[in-house]
Amino acid sequence: MVRWEPGARERLQAAAMDLYISRGFEKTTAADIAQAVGLTERTFFRHFADKREVLFSGQELLEQALLDGVAAAAPHASPLEMVEFALSAAAALFPAERRDHSRRRQTIISGNPALQERELLKLAGLASAVAAALRSRGVPDAMATLAAESGMTVFGVAFRKWIAEGEERSFLDIEREVLGELVAMAVGAA
């Protein structure tokens, strides 16, 4: 086994994705992933808590981008405007060159109910964090929760559109479109 080579985390992630696609998530072990890149299982666990986290690592970056977006909104912005700032900040984490990786990742998650559940829990955690940020900006509790959860719904719909086969628009453009559809629907209902 190779004792040290730079980029161990990235190599483990790439190998895991390849193995999850070729063998299936359930049939791939942490040891398989480590062995594929010449590392030990112990090294794998230094980088990831479990094999699921290979697919979900980086959530802290997404959460921070969302929170930074809320903080960057104008002092008297509406809750929905703050969420729009949050979504725009998060969109920067999804450049065009990441689309293929995201498609592969979603294929793996879609094929496993436990991973789907994990993804929903992670999204719920993001919504809670955004709601807390909105409340800290003076947004009443129920309104903060509604705005944050609506924002995460917009994020999820935009993400699914962005990874659709043949889609070439930027994540930000799609997010803006989906948010516009939500606003139009709400205005139409009022």
Image (spheres, rainbow, N blue to C red):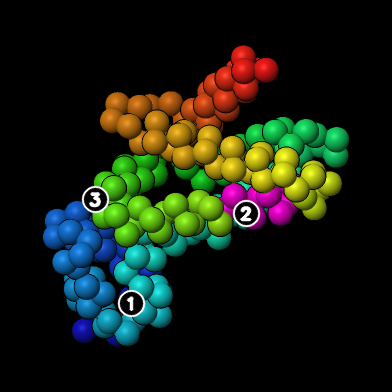
Question: Which residue carries the number 3 mark?
Answer: 111
Please, what is the three-letter code of the amino acid marked with disc 2? Ser
For disc 2, the neighbor class at 10 Å (few under 14, some 14 to 19, many from 20) is some
Specify the principal SS of the magenta part. helix
For mark 2, give the secondary structure: helix
Please, what is the three-letter code of the amino acid marked with disc 1? Phe
For mark 3, give the secondary structure: loop
Q: Nearer the viewer, residue 181 or 85?
A: 181
Which mark sits nearer the N-terminus, 3 or 2? 3
Q: At 63% across and 48% down in the image, what residue appears?
A: 66
Q: Quadrant of residue 165?
A: top left
* Numbered tag placed on residue 128 in the rendering: 2
* Numbered tag placed on residue 81 in the rendering: none
Q: CA distance from mark 2 to mark 1?
A: 30 Å
Q: CA distance from mark 3 to mark 1?
A: 23 Å
Q: At 33% across and 77% down in the image, what residue appears?
A: 44
The image shows residue 105, relative to residue 176, as above or below, that is below
Quadrant of image for the N terminus? bottom left
The x, y position of residue 61, in whole percent, is 56, 56
Q: Quadrant of residue 36?
A: bottom left
For disc 3, the neighbor class at 10 Å (few under 14, some 14 to 19, many from 20) is few
The x, y position of residue 145, in whole percent, is 67, 45
Residue 136 visible in the displayed image: yes
Magenta extent: 126-134
* Numbered tag placed on residue 44 in the rendering: 1
